[in-house]
Image (cartoon, helix red, strand yellow):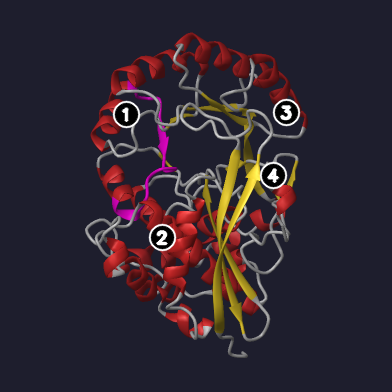
Amino acid sequence: MKAITITRADAQDRRFSLHSGAGSDAIHTSGEYAFAVTQLHTDCGLTGCGITLTMGNGNRAVCDIIDRLTATLVGREIEELMAQFGTVSKRLADDPALRWLGPHKGVVHLALASVVNACFDLWAKSRGVPLWRLLLDLTPAQVVALLDFSYIEDALSKEDALAILNLHLPDRETREGILRSGYPGYDTTVGWFMYEDDRVRKNVQIALAAGFRAFKLKVGSPDGDRDLRRAAILREIAGPDCRIMFDANQQWRLHEAEHMCHALAAFNPYWIEEPTHPDDIEAHRSLAASIAPIRLALGEHVPNRVMFKNFMQAGAVHFVQADCTRLAGVAEFLTVSLMARKFGLPVVPHVGDMGQIHQHLVLFNHIAMGHEAIFLEHIHHLSNYLVHPASIERGVYKTPEAPGLSCDLKAE
């Protein structure tokens, strides 16, 4: 295999206007998505591309940190870099000056996500395979070498991770059929917060015709009756056999969350997502107990594996919505997925990156870890800007075949 060396790195501040109301929720009403993009250039012409999602303002700050982090990668050969990537990523995350700004959260961690994703993208491209294939071709020991277990050894050790991967190695072929059938999707774009009732109704009808059988609605209105009215519309149009979810995007205080979750239970939700502040583990634990059997989903704003560990240990989460553009990239996503597998919790990623990278990762989770293939969120607003946008047919993600992570952007 020809040695491929990183010769230069740069960050790009890419911003995209959304149509009226798209992307809106109870907290975030901006009409702009943005990617802080890492590009790793090499001596052979290949370029690794990594992304993290922001809401426009603040994107430049993430790009500035990307420039700082990638300086240490220039001159590194990609196979050598990835052989013990758990050590590399820990060193990047523990930069003495930048760590003070977190640690392991906020702008610095978002930048690290973009950088780490670019490393995996370049690695997969250098081998000429999509990310899911790259990961499946690794031995369990090689996968474990990619990961940083610091601060979570009490919940997931290297030995635990290796045991999980080895346990599911012999029967992988029983789950590889998903590569042919595709991974189920669910549609979030039907029910953005600022969409009027008639638009929600029409969107659900369109999504049903397109093959989707699961939908998510944004809630968290100052007027709870509005949330209940829209929930009734979604359930009525979707029918009793479709799964529906409600996402409050952290809007409610605990007493409000308890009241609204009980009220929304009338519509048989598959989960209620981000009901209150994402750092309040005790509130989620208390809420999970008080509204059972309604289940909670969260992860969009859980920044690192340590926070996920605490949520899992507290019994405060039922669906783990890990996001490789919010965590420290692909590597930390895999760490959280393994920890969730040990706790017996499903991983259903938040896809702020439009599902581009996660379509690879859920395939690996299912085949290599034995995670249930529930479904993967689908948001299509940025598909026209991507070289290889995720392909959905009849509500199902088709398996990506292009080398890399599927996050290359078209030229501006």
The label number, if any, that marks residue 396 in the structure image: 4
* The one of 69 and 48 positioned closer to us in this rendering: 69
Mark identifier at residue 332: 2
Q: Magenta span covers which residues?
A: 291-306
Q: Is residue 301 above or below residue 80?
A: above
Residue at which label 1 appears: 288
Residue at horizontal 62 percent and vertical 14 percent from the top:
233
Classify mark 3: helix, strand or loop.
helix
Residue 55 magenta-highlighted: no
Vertical comparison of 29 with 155: above or below = above
Could you tell me the amino acid type at mark 2? Glu
Discs 1, 3 touching: Cβ within 8 Å? no
Element at label 1? helix
- The residues bearing labels 4 and 3 have C-alpha atoms spaced at a distance of 12 Å
Mark 1 or mark 3: name the one nearer the start of the chain: 3
Q: Mark 4 or mark 2, which is nearer the start of the sequence?
A: 2
- Residue under the image location 48 percent in, 84 percent down: 76
Residue 390 sits above or below residue 285 on the image: below
